[in-house]
């Protein structure tokens, strides 16, 4: 039987480290956990929701192949799911911070949800489960 495990980081290709840090910390209220200069223009940048276990590793695109993936890491489908206990409070905060929602919030059998875009255009679900 495997030991207890979890996903520690999900790499997210971004245009610019500082733009992404600003978006995730200001607009989504994430915490900047680490920003370490690795030299040669690379940084180890981790952000996470308050109380979250999984972190986003913000990876600035380094070549054309990586730049082509910015905003389309899941082929245009919703890529990540931000679960909350206060959908309407988070929704209002995000709208006030200029986050683009692709649709109005809707009620589904599993909860309240709305699709928004991060600073690079990746679609996310903001979700409060029932």
Image (cartoon, rainbow, N blue to C red):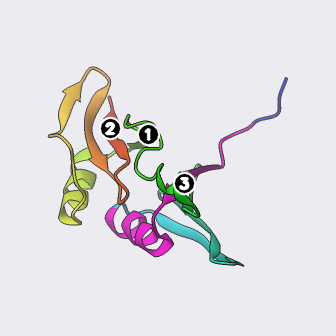
CA–CA distance in space, label 3 to label 1? 16 Å
What residue lies at 32% left-to-right and 38% top-to-bottom? 128
Q: Which residue is mark 3?
A: 66
Can you tell which mark lies on residue 128? 2
Q: Is residue 51 visible?
A: no
The answer to the question of whether label 2 and label 1 lie on touching residues, with beta carbons closer than 8 A, is: no
Mark 2 or mark 3: which comes first in sequence? Answer: 3
The mark closer to the camera, 3 or 1, is: 3
Where residue 111 appears, as percent x and y from the top left, is 29, 29
Where residue 73 appears, as percent x and y from the top left, is 47, 43
Residue at the extreme front of the image, as rendered:
64
Q: Give the vertical position of 2 relative to 81 (above or below).
A: above
Q: Which residue is mark 1?
A: 79
Where residue 27 appears, as percent x and y from the top left, is 32, 64
Specify start and end residues of the magenta stretch as a single range: 5-27
Q: Is residue 57 magenta?
A: no
Where residue 45 appears, as percent x and y from the top left, is 59, 67
The number of numbered discs placed on residues in the rendered structure image is 3
Dot 3 falls on a residue whose secondary structure is helix
Residue at the extreme top of the image, as rendered:
109
The answer to the question of whether label 3 and label 1 lie on touching residues, with beta carbons closer than 8 A, is: no
Dot 2 falls on a residue whose secondary structure is strand
What residue lies at 19% left-to-right and 58% top-to-bottom? 95
Sort mark 2 into few (<14), some (14-19) or many (20+) by Cα contacts within 10 Å.
some
Q: 29 or 38, which is in the foreground?
A: 38
The N terminus: image quadrant: top right
């Amino acid at each position: 039987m495997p030991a207890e495990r979890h996903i520690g980081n999900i790499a997210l290709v971004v245009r610019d480290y500082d733009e992404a840090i600003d978006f995730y910390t200001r607009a989504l209220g994430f915490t900047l956990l680490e920003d370490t200069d690795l030299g040669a223009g690379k940084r180890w940048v981790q952000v996470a929701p308050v109380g979250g276990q999984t972190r986003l590793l913000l990876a600035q695109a380094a070549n054309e192949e990586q730049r082509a993936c910015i905003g389309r890491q899941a082929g245009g489908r919703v890529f990540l799911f931000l679960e909350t206990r206060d959908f309407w409070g988070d929704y209002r905060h995000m709208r006030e911070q200029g986050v683009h929602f692709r649709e109005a919030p809707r009620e589904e059998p599993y909860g309240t949800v709305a699709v928004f875009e991060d600073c690079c255009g990746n679609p996310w679900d903001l979700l409060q489960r029932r």
